[in-house]
Amino acid sequence: MAPEGATPEAERPLAMTAFKIGVVGAAGRMGQMLVREVAATEGCLVAGGTERAGSPALGRDVGEAAGLAPLGVAIGDDADALFRTADAVLDFTAPAASLAHAKLAAKHRKIHVVGTTGIDRAAEAAIAESAKSATIVLAPNMSLGVNLALLLVEQMAGALGPDWDIEILEMHHKHKVDAPSGTALRLGEIAAAAMGTSLERAGVFTREGTTGPRKPGTVGFATLRGGDVVGEHSVIYAGDGERIELTHRATSRQNFAGGALRAARFVASRRAAGVSGMFDMSDVLGLN
């Protein structure tokens, strides 16, 4: 079934200027949501989808795999062909895969929107290198609410100062493989920078046994996993006699899919104006 109010892709007249969008990891939970979001958006066309070699989804219609009417495009395992065909590719896969996909985006000079979490500094630098030839949006979280929370965390950490202790609590579904989440790490990075330090120096990721008193100026993390929780993040500022808690809860992956599509369309407009390179969601949302 197509989303309520949406015209099935196979029945929609295609304009010559349709924005052709591919999805890597198209049969996964997030990949299916991305396919549904693209298919429901006027002016956008699902150009294709890929999965890893050996996936049982290979050969299935990308629309049917996402719970839609057939879109006439089969899921394949050739990411190079997808980047060659599509105007933009949406990528919520794994760090090693996203790094390889960024190189393909550079090879074909295409738009690459990366929402993959767990990407380390070395991989981020390699993706930035690919962005010299491609146009890439890299963000651990593409929801509007989370990106507004990132802005607030920076303002609050800078205003409250070192006398306030900062703890970050996050919870995700039981299938998530990285911890802490990329969003939690980004929240910690911003809080640490606002205090004049770095997360490498200030981060505390485990506590067990006799730890001694909390060290001033640190940023603590706690990670929870279970059930089907889409994503919850809280930044707790604990002072003497008072506490401030900033919390964001995602109840649907549609927030991330909508943000990814918004990012793709944003950088497409920048490319049309002759601007390329690497962007994040603060650029897309005009928060800089």
Image (cartoon, grey):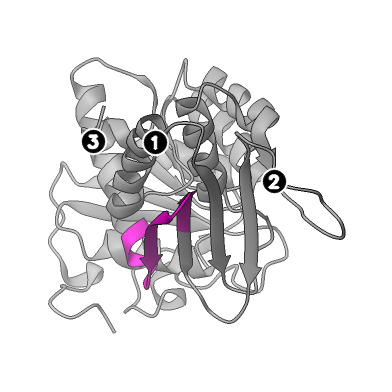
**Separation (CA) of disc 2 from disc 3:** 43 Å
In the rendered image, residue 243 lying in the magenta stretch gets the answer yes
Q: The C terminus is located in which quarter?
A: top left
Q: Given the image, on which type of amino acid does mark 3 rest?
A: Phe
**Separation (CA) of disc 2 from disc 1:** 18 Å
Graded by Cα atoms within 10 Å as few (under 14), some (14 to 19) or many (20 or more), the crowding at tag 1 reads some
Q: From the image, tell me which residue sits under label 3.
A: 266
- Of mark 2 and mark 3, the one earlier in the sequence is 2
In the picture, measured across the screen, residue 189 lies left or right of residue 137, that is right
Q: Given the image, on which type of amino acid does mark 2 rest?
A: Arg
In contact (CB < 8 Å): disc 2 and disc 1: no
* First to last magenta residue range: 234-256
Q: From the image, tell me which residue sits under label 2.
A: 214
Graded by Cα atoms within 10 Å as few (under 14), some (14 to 19) or many (20 or more), the crowding at tag 2 reads few
Label 1, secondary structure: give it.
helix
Graded by Cα atoms within 10 Å as few (under 14), some (14 to 19) or many (20 or more), the crowding at tag 3 reads some
Q: Tell me, yes or no, if residue 86 can be seen here.
A: no
Q: From the image, tell me which residue sits under label 1.
A: 160
Q: Main secondary structure of the magenta part?
A: strand
**Separation (CA) of disc 1 from disc 3:** 34 Å
- Of mark 2 and mark 1, the one earlier in the sequence is 1
